[in-house]
Amino acid sequence: MTEQEKLALLEETLEVDEGSLTPDMHLDDIDEFNSMAVLSLIVMFEDEFDKKITGKEIKTYTSVSEILNRMER
């Protein structure tokens, strides 16, 4: 999966506009990144990547690139 594909999946999961996320963005700068987004990410990781991830782990991330790195198969 390319970085663009991962970004598109993340944008869909967070319900933000297509093309609005970049790897260097801080999660604090994304209004839609809230507790519901964390739950959506947990489900996305399990469904799309067959990976278990916890809300606690997600809350340690500070940037979009950290989430993209975790998407690696």
Image (tube, rainbow, N blue to C red):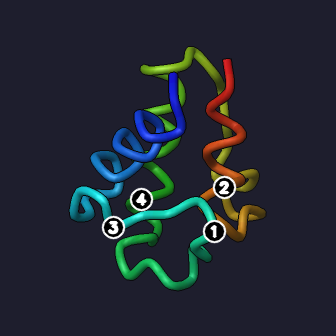
Q: Residue 58's x, y, as percent?
A: 67, 54
Between residues 64 and 33, which one lies in front from this camera angle? 64
> Based on the displayed image, in which of its 4 quarters is residue 15 positioned?
bottom left
| Residue type for callout 4 | Ala
| Residue type for callout 2 | Ser
Q: Indicate which disc, 3 or 4, sits on the residue closer to the N terminus.
A: 3
Give neighbour class at mark 4: few <14, some 14-19, many 20+ (Cα, 10 Å).
Answer: some
Q: Are marks 1 and 2 in contact (CB under 8 Å)?
A: yes
From the viewer's perspective, is the residue at label 3 or at label 4 nearer? 3
Instruction: Kindly identify which residue carries mark 1.
Output: 24
Instruction: Kindly identify which residue carries mark 4.
Output: 37
Q: Residue at x 33, y 47 (%)?
A: 13
Q: CA distance from mark 1 to mark 3?
A: 12 Å
Q: Residue at x 51, y 22 (%)?
A: 1
| Residue type for callout 1 | Asp
Instruction: Kindly identify which residue carries mark 2.
Output: 65
| Residue type for callout 3 | Ser
From the viewer's perspective, is the residue at label 4 or at label 2 nearer? 2
Q: Indicate which disc, 4 or 1, sits on the residue closer to the N terminus.
A: 1
Is residue 37 depicted above or below 33 in this figure?
above
Is residue 20 depicted above or below 41 in this figure?
below
Q: Are marks 4 and 1 in contact (CB under 8 Å)?
A: no
Q: CA distance from mark 1 to mark 2?
A: 6 Å
